[in-house]
Amino acid sequence: MLPLVLAAQPVTSQSPSLNTGRALPQSQTASPPLLTIDQAFKLTTLMDGNRSALLYWDIQPGYYLYQQKLVITDNTNHKLRPNLPPASTLTDEFLGASKVYFDSLQIALPLKELTPTAAGIYQISVTYQGCAQDRYCFPPVTREIHFFRPK
C-alpha cells in the first residue's frame, strides 16, 4: 500500500475564527481522517451452499466504489462477467460521469462458472477502485480470494 501524505496549512494569528471564538465556515473545518481502503470498503466472501460464492462490500458513508473499475478473474485469468446490481450515476472530477455503488455491493459468482485448481480450491482475483467523496480516490487494489466448495 502506498503511503498517504496529507498537507495542512499552518494556523496563524491572522485566522479570524481562532482569535474570536467563532466557528470556522464549513469550507475551513477539518475533514474526518481518511479511512484505509480496507476500512472504507470492507470485503467479505461467503459461500451460498454449493451454488455460488458471494462477494459483499460494506461501503462506509462518504465513500463509493466504481462499477467500471470492478474486475473479477478466475485462476485461469479468465475475466468473469457477473450480473451486477444497478448503480448510481455520479459525476466526479476523476472519471467524469460514472456508475458507482454507495453503502454496499453484493455479487454472486456461480460456482459452475469457476474452475477449481487440481487441489479443489477455487481462486479468484478481485480488482476494485473507490473514492472518498470529494476528497481522494484510492488506487485500484487487487485481492486474491481462495475458497473450497462445501460438501
Image (tube, rainbow, N blue to C red):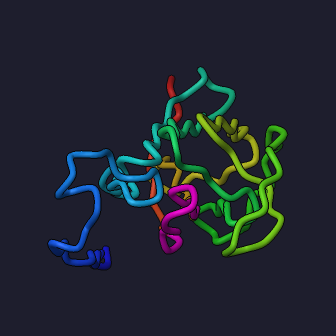
Write the residue at 80% across / 62% down.
98
At x 53%, y 71%, the residue is 140
Q: Which residues are magenta?
A: 128-140
| 79 vs 49: above or below | below
Is residue 137 a member of the stretch shown in magenta?
A: yes
Give the quadrant of the N terminus. Answer: bottom left
At x 50% / y 26%, what residue is drawn? 150
Which residue sits furthest front? 20
Residue 81: x and y in percent read 80, 55
Q: Residue at x 28, y 62 (%)?
A: 16
- As displayed, is residue 143 above or below residue 39? below
Q: Which of the 4 image quadrants contains residue 103?
A: top right
Residue 13: give x, y in percent of width and height.
15, 72
- Horizontally, residue 115 falls left or right of residue 12, namely right
Residue 38 rendering spot, x and y as whole percentages: 37, 52
Q: Is residue 141 left or right of residue 87?
A: left
Which of the two residues, 1 or 145, is positioned nearer the viewer here? 1
